[in-house]
Every structure is written in C-alpha cells, then in structure tokens.
Image (cartoon, rainbow, N blue to C red):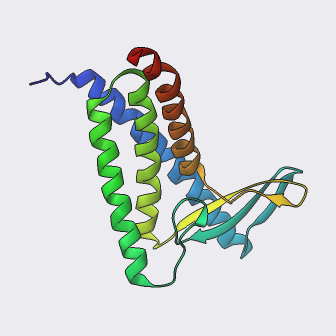
Amino acid sequence: MSKINFKQLIFNAIIIAGIFLIDRISKLYIIKLAEIENNLDVYLNEYLNLYLIWNKGIAFGLFSFDDNFIYNLITLTIIIITTIVLAMMHKSGGFQKYCLISIFAGSLGNLFDRIYYSAVPDFIDLHIDNFHWFIFNVADIFITVGIICLIYVEIFFNKKNND
C-alpha cells in the first residue's frame, strides 16, 4: 500500500485547476467577444486568426455528428478515457506524471464544455497562406503537448530503461 504525499497531491491539483482555469477564461473571453460582435473573425497576424466555431466532435472536429446518441456515446467515451488518464496519472511519477496532468486537465476543460454547452468552443486558427490547420482551443494545446511529451518519454527514456 502506497503512502499518499498530500503536498504533491495538492501541488498536482493546483496545476490541474490552473490549466482548467486558463482554458475556461480563454473560452469565456472569446464567447463574450463573439456575443458582443455577433460573430468572431479576428485577424491577429498573417499566421493567426481568432475564429469561433462550436465543435460537437472530438479533437479538431473529427466525428462531428448531429445525432444526440452518437454525441452522447462520444462524450461517454471521453469520460472513460479521462478516467483512465487519471488512473495512469496516479500510478506514474516524474515527468510522465506532468504529461498526464496536462492531458487530464485539458480533457476536463473540453469535457466541461461538452456537458455545459453541448459543444466545445474552438477559436485558434493557425494558417500559412490558404492552408489552415484545424481550429482548436487552449485545452487542445495542453492535451497535444502532453501527448507529444509522453511519446517522447516512451521513445527515448523507456527504451533506454528496457535495454
């Protein structure tokens, strides 16, 4: 039986809450801005726009359906995956734990929106000339960075440990 380190637990909870709040504040700001302007299409520079869309699918708008059953099934799947990430986070340590914290907190942010708004507000539009990447939000950034870092850890650090 492992002993719980309450200082570490509180520190991790603060990181999760911080990421969640950064995501919520950014989304609330963009939603409010869109309400004031009746639309949101802001040119920031030649590579970045703010353009609000409501995503009913998963990451980057994949699997967007109007069917409530499919939407609820996707939401249930996301809840299960988020719970698995929480369990993995509890069992991991070091840098890997912080990667999972990033994924978990970002997932919580998007899950909150799926439940509260029945869609996730995405608004960051990266592009080069006419090539636009999928529109995403701050939670997606934390999820993506967490996953990339986890892959990096798996490839370069766990390989050395297994040799």
Front in this rendered view, residue 53 or 150:
150
Name the image quarter holding residue 115: bottom left
State the residue lying farthest toward the bottom: 67
Q: How many marks?
A: 0
Front in this rendered view, residue 13 or 150:
150
Residue drawn at (17%, 25%), measured in percent from left and top? 4
Front in this rendered view, residue 99 or 32:
99
Query: Is residue 111 positioned above or below 155 on the image?
Result: below
- Tell me residue 47's x, y (percent): 84, 49
- Tell me residue 88's x, y (percent): 30, 38
Q: Which quadrant is the C terminus positioned in?
A: top left
- Image-based side of 92 in relation to 99, left or right: left
Query: Is residue 12 positioned above or below 160 on the image?
Result: below
Residue drawn at (73%, 68%), measured in percent from left and top? 40
- Tell me residue 32's x, y (percent): 62, 65
Front in this rendered view, residue 42 or 57:
57
Q: Which quadrant is the N terminus positioned in?
A: top left
- Image-based side of 78 in relation to 3, left or right: right
Residue drawn at (62%, 61%), measured in percent from left and top? 122
Residue drawn at (21%, 21%), measured in percent from left and top? 5
Query: Is residue 46 positioned above or below 111 on the image?
Result: above
- Tell me residue 83's x, y (percent): 29, 50
State the residue lying farthest toward the front: 163
Name the image quarter holding residue 101: top left
